[in-house]
């Protein structure tokens, strides 16, 4: 029974495809891909709507107030109201804007984010597209977001937009390196770039209670933290939302967009969050595996979305708690701390792997990580930069 | 498409006669061979893998076209960045050639073509970075990116 | 069906490349340049070299296109329009294309269909080759990229007066 529930979507898709038994092979393949895409879009658009509501409610609770609670029971129909509002707003395009570039920019950013969602395994046998270099595909597609951001900034013919776009691209390019290098220890230990293989390598339990997730190793924990922070930056979330900081640069590259195009930017940001969280779950948190052996009867996709929900809650929590980071502090952090720390994670993973993956390996890799961290935090020189301000008054 | 894929490879003599036509309609002309009467075009059972493609000549023609478009950009524009764009296109065309020859060679082939292309892409990236840095440095001095005006060795 | 894919990708790529070479506005040319490289990457996928296709998108569209776009931003001067188009370049390019086309079509050994792929090229194979047979080129590429990085930085740094 639990096996049936686990594979219910796969069985459903096979039943739908059984209507096409007479058709040539390429038709079946195209229909199968289309079904995958439709399911993916349906799930994630619903999740986007729910997430936009829950973000407002959770932020509100952190700030000691209620969120939207008037539109439906507990405000559950608020996304519908938001959607209608966005759709009926007037679409203002500046007169001297570059029309094709201005139009295509949000589409490109949203398309890149949605493409990245296609290679993540959502459950047992439930990966929409299995590509041999799946992780590489994810990052290749994610890096095309920068061109889209530039198009948005340039196409608006607005100095704030161009400045915001340049800052956004500088931020995204700087943090792409730690993002990718922190994935390397996982790929190295697993020996494959396929997300399915990485999830399969995290199967199994020690003592029936401790899962073999990579986050429970010292290099995995450090890499997960670095990956998560880089993911925060890549999706332009607070505390790294300089590109869209309202008080600084009037929404940056998204200034001249109104109505539905702004909603698409919004959606692209959330889809980027989903993609990065999904990849973090796949790489570090064991994918669709259950945490303890007893709970394996629950369906695999349920575990995946549960873990995804926890990570998204942490995203929102951080947004409600931390103030914005200054641009030069952010670049400093990326190049002087995160990049060397990411390399240290690779070293620690190698030490763990060759010291036997048991307790000895754990302790040795922990020593490597702690040593590098202490050295870096002394060397980064935060004393001068973050010291309390001294005021000098005119005498 | 209405064409038997087996017809792609068995063309005895090309009807091209040396016309150089950079428009893409000529590529269709190669592909049309008359079907034997009563035969419906089906994919042959042995060649069912998804990457079944037209002949090597078509690929080489396409990459030659890309190379020449890159040459066009490099030779006929006066803006330094356009010239760099043209050079990048020429490098990509060469990479396409390598991969085409690797694929059409006797299988199982050692992936030499793939490795060379990977290195070529890395070299192209390095060269683009240095070239663009040069353009910025020269712009700071001459305040122009028109290569016709960068004609003095004395800085 | 795959010949249809070939033709579609070929048209897309060549149209984008022509647009990149001939458009007046530099930004449009840079963006269609990125599109042309997506077309080249699609060709790599069609030919069965998926790893190279992904690297192509990663490096060219994700890095080189962004570099070019940044350089365009940093070297803007008004008026924006390009000063002149050299028609002799067009004639030369057409002549080279004619020569290459003649050479390709004369070589009869090239009108072959692709042999069936016995084994797909996996990332693992590429990785193993890079670490065994191609270790020297790999290290040289590393040094080259480091030199290019440092060189580009040195070129662009403002001179301290």
Image (spheres, rainbow, N blue to C red):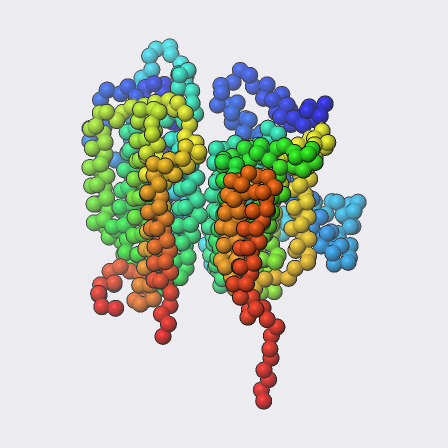
Relative to A107, residue B3 above or below: above
Task: Give the residue drawn at x 68%, y 57%.
Answer: A320
Q: Position of residue A184 (x, y in %)?
A: 50, 44
Q: Position of residue B100 (x, y in %)?
A: 32, 32
Name, please, the residue furthest toward the bottom: A395
Q: Going by the image, does C39 lie left or right of A351?
A: left
Q: Position of residue B116 (x, y in %)?
A: 32, 38
Relative to A310, residue B139 above or below: below
Q: Nearer the viewer, residue A294 or B148?
A: A294
Relative to A202, residue A92 above or below: below
Task: Give the residue drawn at x 65%, y 26%.
Answer: A7
Task: Give the residue drawn at x 59%, y 46%.
Answer: A363
Q: Going by the image, does A265 lie left or right of C127?
A: right
Taking the image as drawn, is residue C28 in sight? no
Taking the image as drawn, is residue A316 in sight? yes
Task: Give the residue drawn at x 67%, y 50%.
Answer: A314
Locate residue B33: give its quadrant: top left
Q: How many marks?
A: 0
Q: Position of residue B42 (x, y in %)?
A: 41, 16
Name, please, the residue furthest toward the front: A360
The quarter of the picture where the N terminus of chain C appears is: top left
The quarter of the picture where the C terminus of chain C appears is: bottom left
Q: Going by the image, does C70 lie left or right of A354?
A: left
């Amino acid at each position: 029974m639990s096996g049936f529930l686990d594979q219910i979507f796969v069985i459903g898709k096979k039943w739908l495809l059984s209507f096409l038994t007479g058709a040539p092979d390429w038709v079946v393949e195209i229909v199968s891909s289309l079904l995958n895409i439709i399911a993916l879009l349906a799930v994630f658009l619903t999740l986007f709507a729910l997430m936009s509501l829950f973000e407002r409610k959770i932020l509100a609770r952190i700030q000691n107030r209620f969120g939207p609670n008037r539109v439906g029971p507990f405000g559950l129909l608020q996304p519908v109201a938001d959607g209608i509002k966005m759709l009926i707003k007037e679409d203002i395009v500046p007169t001297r804007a570059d029309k094709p570039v201005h139009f295509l920019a949000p589409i490109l950013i949203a398309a890149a984010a949605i493409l990245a969602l296609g290679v993540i395994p959502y459950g047992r046998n439930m990966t929409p597209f299995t590509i041999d270099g799946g992780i590489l595909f994810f990052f290749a597609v994610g890096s095309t977001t920068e061109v889209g951001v530039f198009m948005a900034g340039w196409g608006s013919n607005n100095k704030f937009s161009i400045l915001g776009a340049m800052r956004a691209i500088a931020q995204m390019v700087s943090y792409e390196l730690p993002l990718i290098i922190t994935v390397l220890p996982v790929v190295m230990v697993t020996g494959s770039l396929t997300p399915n293989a990485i999830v399969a390598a995290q199967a199994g339990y020690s003592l029936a209670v401790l899962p073999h997730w990579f986050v429970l190793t010292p290099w995995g924990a450090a890499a997960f933290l670095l990956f998560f922070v880089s993911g925060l930056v890549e999706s332009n979330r607070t505390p790294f939302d300089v590109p869209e900081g309202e008080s600084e640069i009037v929404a940056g590259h998204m200034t001249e967009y109104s109505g539905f195009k702004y909603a698409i930017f919004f959606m692209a940001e959330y889809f980027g969050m989903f993609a990065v969280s999904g990849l973090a779950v796949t790489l570090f948190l064991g994918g669709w595996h259950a945490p303890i052996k007893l709970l394996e009867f629950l369906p695999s996709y349920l575990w995946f979305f549960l873990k995804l929900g926890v990570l998204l809650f942490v995203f929102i929590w951080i947004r409600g708690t931390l103030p914005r980071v200054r641009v030069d502090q952010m670049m400093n952090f990326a190049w002087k701390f995160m990049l060397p720390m990411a390399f240290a994670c690779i070293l620690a993973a190698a030490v763990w792997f060759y010291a036997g993956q048991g307790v000895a390996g754990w302790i040795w890799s922990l020593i490597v990580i702690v040593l590098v961290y202490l050295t870096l935090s002394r060397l980064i020189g935060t004393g001068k930069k973050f010291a309390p301000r001294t005021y000098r008054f005119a005498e | 498409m209405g064409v038997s894929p087996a017809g792609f490879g068995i063309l005895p003599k090309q009807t091209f006669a040396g016309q150089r036509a950079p428009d893409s309609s000529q590529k269709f002309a190669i592909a049309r061979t008359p079907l034997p009467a009563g035969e419906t075009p089906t994919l042959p059972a042995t060649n069912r893998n998804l990457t079944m493609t037209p002949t090597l000549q078509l690929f080489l023609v396409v990459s030659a076209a890309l190379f020449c478009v890159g040459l066009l950009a490099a030779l006929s524009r006066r803006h330094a960045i356009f010239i760099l764009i043209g050079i990048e296109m020429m490098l990509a065309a060469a990479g396409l050639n390598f991969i085409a020859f690797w694929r059409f060679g006797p299988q199982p082939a050692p992936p030499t073509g793939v490795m060379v292309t990977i290195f070529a892409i890395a070299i192209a990236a390095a060269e683009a970075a240095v070239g663009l840095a040069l353009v910025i440095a020269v712009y700071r001095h001459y305040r122009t990116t028109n290569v016709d005006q960068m004609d003095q060795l004395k800085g | 069906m795959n010949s249809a894919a070939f033709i579609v990708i070929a048209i897309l790529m060549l149209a984008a490349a022509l647009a990149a070479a001939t458009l007046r506005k530099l930004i449009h040319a840079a963006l269609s340049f990125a599109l042309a490289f997506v077309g080249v990457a699609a060709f790599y996928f069609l030919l069965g070299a998926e790893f190279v296709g992904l690297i192509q998108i990663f490096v060219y569209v994700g890095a080189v296109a962004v570099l070019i776009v940044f350089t365009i931003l940093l070297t803007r001067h008004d008026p924006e329009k390009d000063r002149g188009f050299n028609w002799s370049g067009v004639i030369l390019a057409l002549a080279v294309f004619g020569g290459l086309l003649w050479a390709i079509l004369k070589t009869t050994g090239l009108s072959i269909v692709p042999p069936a792929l016995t084994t797909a090229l996996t990332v693992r194979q590429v990785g193993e080759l890079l670490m065994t047979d191609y270790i020297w080129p790999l290290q040289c590429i590393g040094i080259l990229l480091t030199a290019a990085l440092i060189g580009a930085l040195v070129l662009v740094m403002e001179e301290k007066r």
